[in-house]
Amino acid sequence: MNIAYVSFEHPLGISGGGIGTYIGEISKVMSSRGNNVEVFSATHNSDTTLEIDNYKLHLINAKDNFEFRYKVVDIFKHRHQKQKFDIIESAEYGADGLIISENFPKIPLVVKLHTPMFLVEKLNNVFLPLIKKVRFIFGGLIKGEFNEPYWIYRKCKDPEYKIYMRATSISSPSISLKKIITKNWGLSKSIEVIPNPFEPSNELLKLRYRRSSSFIRVTFIGKIEPRKGVINLIQAIPIILKKNSNIKFRFVGAIHESSQRSVLFRKYIKKILSENADKIEFTDFQPRVMLPILLSDTDICIFPSLWENFPNVCLESMSAGKVVIGTNNGGMAEMITHLQNGYLIPPASTKAISKAVIKLAADKMLRKKMGEAARQKVLNHYNAQIIGKATEELYQQIISNKPE
C-alpha cells in the first residue's frame, strides 16, 4: 500500500505531544511491514524532505495548524502525481488533512481520533467560575459588542468536525473516546478501536524497582493545566504530607495557558504549597529523552486527569516498571487493571488521590508487584506486531471497498 500520513506534529518537526509521538511510531511500524509510507508534517524551519526508518518525511514551514492545512496541499499534490496514494490518515485534532481531503475526495481518508479541541476546552473550563463568564459577556456589552462565549461549543463551525464528517473510516485508540465522539458528533461512520502502537525504549525497560531511599518520590508528568487534574493533586499534597512527611513530589511539565491565567495559576500553586515548598519540585518541560532519568528515582507516577484518551506517558511509566495512579473514566482505565498493574481513582477527587498515594507509599511490595505487572501489560498488548496488523487490515478493507 501507498500510505500518506498528514500531521502538523512529528518528533523531527514540531514535536507537540501525543500526536507527534503516534505519527513517528505508526509510520515506522507500517513501513516495516513493507508498505510505502510518506509523512507530511510541519516545521518552523525551511522546507525539507528526509528519509528515516524506511519512509519519507516531508517537513513544511508553517506557524500553526491553519497555515499548514493549506500549505501542505501543493507538496501532497506533487507527491501524489508520482506515488498515487491508496489511503490518507490524519487526526481530527487540528484538522490537518481537511483541505487535502477536499481537493482529493477520491482517496480514502482515515481520521484517527486523538482528543478534539472542543473536549480539551471543556475539560480546562471545568473550574471556570460563573463570575468570570458574566464579566466576559458584560465586558463586551459595555463596549457595544457581543462576545460569543468561548466556553460554548458549536460544531458546525469546527474544522475538526468537518474532517470527521468527510472521513471514509474512523479509528479511535480507546473505547472511551469513541463513546464521547459518538455522543457529541454523531456516528457518521463506524468507529474502529485500535490502540496506538507503543514500543518502549531500552532505557525504560532497563529500569528496575527503586529498592532503597530516604524518601518516596511521586512524579507527575504532563501539562500543568486543569484538565490534567493538577488542581486536585495540589490540594491533596498537604493532606498527604500530614499523614506521611517522607514523600516528595515532582511536577514535570510547563503551564500551558494564556499569560494572565498562567500567572494566576502559579500564584494559586504557590499559595497552596507554601508550607511544603521543600517537598515540591517543578522541572518545567523536559524532552522525552530525559524520561528514563526522571523515572529512575521515581517510586509512584500519578496522572489524575479529568479525562484522557490514550496517554503515552502512562505506558512509558508502566514500561519502566513504575506503579501508576490513573483515573478510571478514560483511556487509562483500558490500560490499567485496578490493583493488578496499577491503581485507578475517580477524577476530580482530592480524597481519592490522597488515599491512593498514602496507601502505595506505605507498601513497597505492592508497588513492586504492580510495577512488574504493568511492564508486562505494555509489552503484551501494545507492541508493533499486534497494532501494525490491525491497522493494515483496516486500511486494506477500506481500499477494497473503495468505489470504482
Image (cartoon, rainbow, N blue to C red):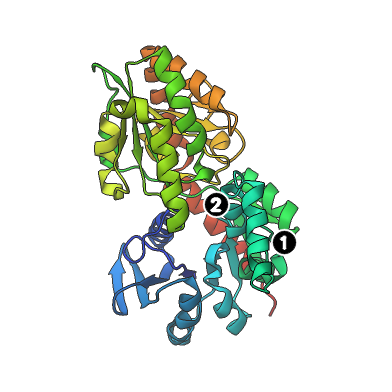
Please tell me which residue is depicted at 31% across the width and 29% down the height of the picture.
277
| Quadrant hosting residue 110 | bottom right
Residue named by callout 2: 390
Q: Which mark is residue 189?
A: 1
Disc marking residue 336: none
Residue neighbourhood size for the residue with mark 2, other residues' Cα within 10 Å, grouped as few (<14), some (14–19), many (≥20): some
Work out whether residue 81 or residue 350 is closer to the camera in this orientation and state it. 350
Q: Nearer the viewer, mark 2 or mark 1?
A: 1
Q: Nearer the viewer, residue 142 or 356?
A: 142
Residue at point 54%, 27% (across, down) = 350
Q: Quadrant of residue 298?
A: top left
299 lies left or right of 337: left
Residue 41 located left or right of residue 131: left
Q: Give the image location of residue 118, x and y in percent.
A: 62, 58
**Residue 304 percent location from the top left of the image:** 51, 34
Q: Is residue 208 above or below residue 200?
A: above
Label 1, residues with CA under 10 Å away: few <14, some 14-19, many ≥20: some
Residue 366 visible, this angle: no
Q: Secondary structure at mark 2?
A: helix
User: Does label 2 or label 1 sit earlier along the sequence?
Assistant: 1
The reply to whether discs 2 and 1 touch (Cβ–Cβ < 8 Å) is: no
Q: The C terminus is located in which quarter?
A: bottom right
Q: Is residue 139 visible?
A: yes
Q: Residue 38, image x and y in percent? A: 41, 71
Above or below, 204 relative to 36: above
Q: Nearer the viewer, residue 380 or 144?
A: 144
Give residue 374's quadrant in the image.
top left
Q: Where is 372 relative to 85, above or below? A: above
Q: Secondary structure at mark 1?
A: loop
Alpha-carbon distance for marks 2 and 1? Answer: 18 Å
